[in-house]
Image (cartoon, helix red, strand yellow):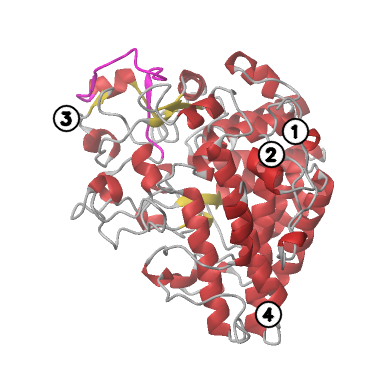
Amino acid sequence: MKGLNKILFLFVALIFLGSCKNFLEVEPIGRVSNEDYLKTEDQIDKALVGIYATLQYAYSNGSWASIWFIKNLPGDDVLCGGGGPADQPEYQYIDDFKIQPDNKKLETVWFNLYRVINQCNTIIDRVDANTDKKKQQVAEAKALRALSYFNLVVMYGGVPLRLHNPEDTTQYAMPRATVDDVYDQIFKDFTEAIPDLPLRSQQAAADRFHMSKGAAQAFLGKAYIYHKDYDKAAQVLQQVINSGEYSLEPNFKDVWTKETEFGNESLFEVSYSAAKVYNWGNFPWGGGNQSNIEVQLQGPRPDIFDLSNFKADSLLGFDILPGWGFNMPSRKIGQAFEAAGDTLSRGKYSVLSQQKFEQYGGVIKNPNAHDYEGYMRIKYTTRMEETNMNGTPELNYTTNWRLMRYADVLLLAAEAYHFLGDEATALKYINEVRQRAGLPDRTNTNPDSVFQYIVTERELELAFEASRFWDLVRWGLAEQELSDLGFVVGKNEVFPIPQDEIIANTAISQSDQNPGY
């Protein structure tokens, strides 16, 4: 029966995948029907760990349906890459705006986000928050549910708003909520969660993969920005800034290193580990991988980039291993760094031009390769130091995805203040980010100029961080910047509701599908 697996997953909640770092390894905790389940703080902690394991899978899995990569693909800073149009075609279709409702990558993203929501609902509904610790645990579940709904509403528009898990198949059918109703629930969950969440400085080092007060505030501020509630966004983002809990890493090149995981700039990240020392025989392609397999997928492809004589360590300070060639940088983003004079710090550790690659001993073997436009991506590349060479290097990358960092907070705050007419404060936060990049301060307070500064800074600072496309959409600039890539206004602002969801959910019909699909 079509859609049956999707429905059954709603009833076998909290059967968790794998783990993240060693501190995420837990024993199986049983089914939610157990009357004694989620009574103790320890049980709830294990349930929360399971949610983070699901997030880990959702952002990197052997079925190649990473939320991270998929949110990057429609932007003009990213090209799909890989071995050609037939290599992971459903990724290629997203990149080329040839998107259909039966795209299995988008269906898997939808399913994984609802799986997180399902697990959060179980904690929120079942836990009697009669201690301060349990209040914190319920708050964490609410914040993670809000983050999942934020991803869903941004990517798909209005979606079914499941706040309680169905007890039988008759309760599964649920219509799409409006976009405003989904945002209202996001605001409610974050707002209720924040008072009971700890500051990052109150978390033990081993617990910093958990949602903190500052992370929830930052995501709430981002949601307000997307909903154009600029006054509320400025208030909550200013609280993050004033907290003193976060700061920019002094050097842009250090933002993604192992040494700065959960560091000064990081508010929230998905964690990975090489502790399992995977090889081709034991890697769990079906799910539960602790390592970040998506990093290998997105490293420089050896039939394009000959790295054998490339002196990466001399140029960048670290060595690069070959990957499988997805997530290629566009010529447009490479030229944007050059046009901005942003090539010594931020540009250097984001993209590498063919000229510079060849200058340091690299060889371009196939300049006409699929989606190669003269640049290699350096940000989130396949660093030798980020894998375990005792196993199969391709399968053991430990790279954490930084989902929210302080530079993003500053630029979101700048945007909020700009739309409130406070250009001086907007420039203050723009310039804080630029100073780290070694660039001169912006001084022109003309509102049109300040807005363009924000557009440019977010394009360069957050390149390849799943931001660019969604920024263009909410600014109304997607048609201007992306129409030559296939973007269709009135259609491609969101992805289609997955066809399997329409089949399984009898409260949604084909007439409820997003326009154009």
Q: Looking at numbered disc 2 in the image, what kind of residue is underneath it?
A: Ile
Looking at the image, can residue 243 be seen? no
What residue is pinned by disc 4?
A: 127
Badge 3 crowding class, 10 Å Cα cut-off, few under 14, some 14 to 19, many 20 or more, is few
What residue is pinned by disc 2?
A: 497
- Measure how far apart labels 3 and 2 are at the Cα level: 45 Å
Of residues 394 and 132, the one nearer the viewer is 394
Task: Kindly identify which numbered label has been placed on residue 514.
Answer: 1
Are the residues at dot 1 and dot 2 in contact (C-beta closer than 8 Å)? yes
Q: Quadrant of residue 284?
A: bottom left
Of residues 111 and 370, the one nearer the viewer is 111
- Measure how far apart labels 2 and 4 are at the Cα level: 32 Å
Image x and y of residue 27, in percent: 42, 76
Badge 2 crowding class, 10 Å Cα cut-off, few under 14, some 14 to 19, many 20 or more, is many
Marked residue nearer the N-terminal end (4 or 1): 4
Please, is residue 216 above or below residue 444 in the view? below
**For the magenta stretch, what is the residue range?**
360-379
Are the residues at dot 4 and dot 1 in contact (C-beta closer than 8 Å)? no
